Amino acid sequence: MRGIVYLCGMKTVQIKASDFFELLKSRDTSMWSVFAQMIDGTEKELVFLNSENQVLFSYVLPTNKETLDKDQARFAQEYGKKLAELS
């Protein structure tokens, strides 16, 4: 996958944010679907970088789909609140 670098043994995944979100758009898929495909039973830190390799944000990918689903629900709720505040 373009824009994603796996750092061996560190359980850290660095992701070029612009490439990642372009990929999602071009494949008409959600980030949560991609995250679900990355679950393999080990916790990973996903570090999203800008074009200058500066950290934008990070997310700890859980070890199971159930926790990911909870994270997705919590994210949707918090995102909805932030959008409501902007209106």
Image: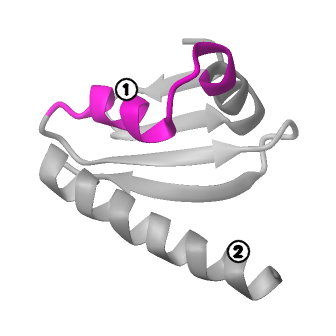
Residue 52: x and y, percent?
Answer: 87, 40
Relative horizontal placement of residue 9, taking residue 19 as reference (left or right): left
Question: Per the image, is 38 magenta?
Answer: yes
Where is residue 29? Give x, y as percent.
51, 26
Q: Secondary structure at mark 1?
A: loop
32 is higher (above) or lower (below) than 4: below
Question: In percent of the image, x 38 and y 71: which residue is there?
Answer: 74
The x, y position of residue 59, in whole percent, is 46, 56
Q: Earlier in the sequence, mark 2 or mark 1?
A: 1
Q: Quadrant of residue 19?
A: top right
Q: Looking at the rendering, in which quadrant would you find the N terminus?
A: top right
Q: What residue is at 82 percent from the left and 82 percent from the top?
A: 87
Q: Which residue is nearer to you in this view: 81 or 35?
A: 81
Q: State the residue at coordinates (52%, 77%).
A: 78
Q: Please name the residue that numbered disc 2 is placed on.
A: 83
Residue 17, picture quadrant: top right
Label annotation for residue 8: 1
Q: Amino acid at mark 2?
A: Leu
User: Principal SS element in the magenta part?
Assistant: helix
Q: In the drawing, what numbered circle is on residue 35?
A: none
Q: How is the image coloured?
A: one colour
Residue at point 71%, 44% (across, down): 49
Decide: marks 2, 1 in contact (CB < 8 A)? Answer: no
Q: Residues within 10 Å of mark 2 (few under 14, many from 20)?
A: few
Q: Mark 1: which amino acid?
A: Cys
| Cα–Cα span, label 2 and label 1 | 38 Å
Looking at the rendered image, the disc whose residue lies closer to the viewer, 2 or 1, is: 2
36 shown above or below 59? above
The x, y position of residue 40, in whole percent, is: 17, 31
Q: Which residues make up the magenta segment?
A: 24-40
